[in-house]
Image: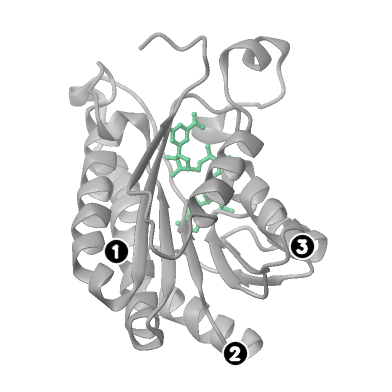
């Protein structure tokens, strides 16, 4: 395809794998994250565009969309993947940590959608894909803050789906279980994680699948787990 895709959190993990796969499929990819050096490497590999940005910053988010349109002249896909998390008992979580998690996961998704939606509605086509989490649908101890951010991100995307469908714009949510990435300061690539976690490329393939639905089909939700994950 000659489609143009913005992928947030493209410097590593799921976003990086998604940027690489979409580029391999022929999309022009706009790679977004804060780490400029890592982003440059991904942009180079995808023959795409690196736009360093903090998705939680309104000016940055709008700039990503402006740069995409300036550089490629069109915009078709937004993958809202950038996200952060940390885990502790509720009383141990600092209020600043609450702000950090909600800023990236919820406000970041809101701002990126807010910046692309007017363009997609006008165009009469487009696809927004949110990488949320299976914890947008279940709760667990030490996950009160991260989990509530994912419930909020999911609700935002679900409401947006109902706002934009009549304009020909699709919104899909993908809910991964455990994925072997740098998430929460993890070190990916251990032999143990090989058995217990999905690979970032598994989620990239889910994004591809969702995008390949025929024009009259929208995949609203896609839950995906490693076979070994029993919760
Ligand atoms: O994590 P990681 P994942 N502005 O840490 C970027 C969800 N998920 O790939 O800014 C812009 O390897 C960051 O780049 P940088 C999870 O909630 C995961 O696993 O340079 N970008 C990096 O590229 C998240 O929504 C698991 O630090 C920002 C990327 O985000 C998504 O999957 C399970 C940013 C994070 O890469 C991708 O996370 C699950 C900002 N303010 C859901 N802050 C799992 N791994 O098990 C961060 O259910 N980024």
Q: Quadrant of residue 111?
A: bottom left
Question: Would you say residue 104 is visible in this rendering?
Answer: no
Residue at point 72%, 59% (across, down): 25
Q: Secondary structure at mark 1?
A: helix
> Where 102 falls versus 87 (above or below)?
below
> Where 105 falls versus 27 (above or below)?
above
Residue at point 23%, 63% (across, down): 160
Q: Which mark is residue 110?
A: 1
Q: Secondary structure at mark 3?
A: helix
Q: Earlier in the sequence, mark 2 or mark 1?
A: 2
Q: CA distance from mark 2 to mark 1?
A: 23 Å
Q: Position of residue 151 (x, y in %)?
A: 22, 40
Q: Position of residue 15 (x, y in %)?
A: 58, 50
Mark 2, other Cα within 10 Å: few <14 / some 14–19 / many ≥20: few
Nearer to us of marks 2 and 1 is: 2
Depth check, front residue: 112 or 27: 27
Residue at point 38%, 49% (across, down): 219
Q: Position of residue 169 (x, y in %)?
A: 35, 70
> Where 191 falls versus 83 (above or below)?
above
Q: Quadrant of the C terminus?
A: top left
Q: Quadrant of the N terminus?
A: bottom right
Q: Is residue 198 left or right of residue 169?
A: right
Q: Which mark is residue 46?
A: 3
Q: CA distance from mark 2 to mark 3?
A: 18 Å
Q: Position of residue 77 (x, y in %)?
A: 50, 67
Q: Is residue 171 left or right of residue 82?
A: left
> Where 72 falls versus 14 (above or below)?
below
Q: Secondary structure at mark 2?
A: loop
Report which residue position mark 2 lands on.
73
Q: Earlier in the sequence, mark 3 or mark 1?
A: 3
Mark 1, other Cα within 10 Å: few <14 / some 14–19 / many ≥20: many
Q: Quadrant of residue 218?
A: bottom left
């Amino acid at each position: 395809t000659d489609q143009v895709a913005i992928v947030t959190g493209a410097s590593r993990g799921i976003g990086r794998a998604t940027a690489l796969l979409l580029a391999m499929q022929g999309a022009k990819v706009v790679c977004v994250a804060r780490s400029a050096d890592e982003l440059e490497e991904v942009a180079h590999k995808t023959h795409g565009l690196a736009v360093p940005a903090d998705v939680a910053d309104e000016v940055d988010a709008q700039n990503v969309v402006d740069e995409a349109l300036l550089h490629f002249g069109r915009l078709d896909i937004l993958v809202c993947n950038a996200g952060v998390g940390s885990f502790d008992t509720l009383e141990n979580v600092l209020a600043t940590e609450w702000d950090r998690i909600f800023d990236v996961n919820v406000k970041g998704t809101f701002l990126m959608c807010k910046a692309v939606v007017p363009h997609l509605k006008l165009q009469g086509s487009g696809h927004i894909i949110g990488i949320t989490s299976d914890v947008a649908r279940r709760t667990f101890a030490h996950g009160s803050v991260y989990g509530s951010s994912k419930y909020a991100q999911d609700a935002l995307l679900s409401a947006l789906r109902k706002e934009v469908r009549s304009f020909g714009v699709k919104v899909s949510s993908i809910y991964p279980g455990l994925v072997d990435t740098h998430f929460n300061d993890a070190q990916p690539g251990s032999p143990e994680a090989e058995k217990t976690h999905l690979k970032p490329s598994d989620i990239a393939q889910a994004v591809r699948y969702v995008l390949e639905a025929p024009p009259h089909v929208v995949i609203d939700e896609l839950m995906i787990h490693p076979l070994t994950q029993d919760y």
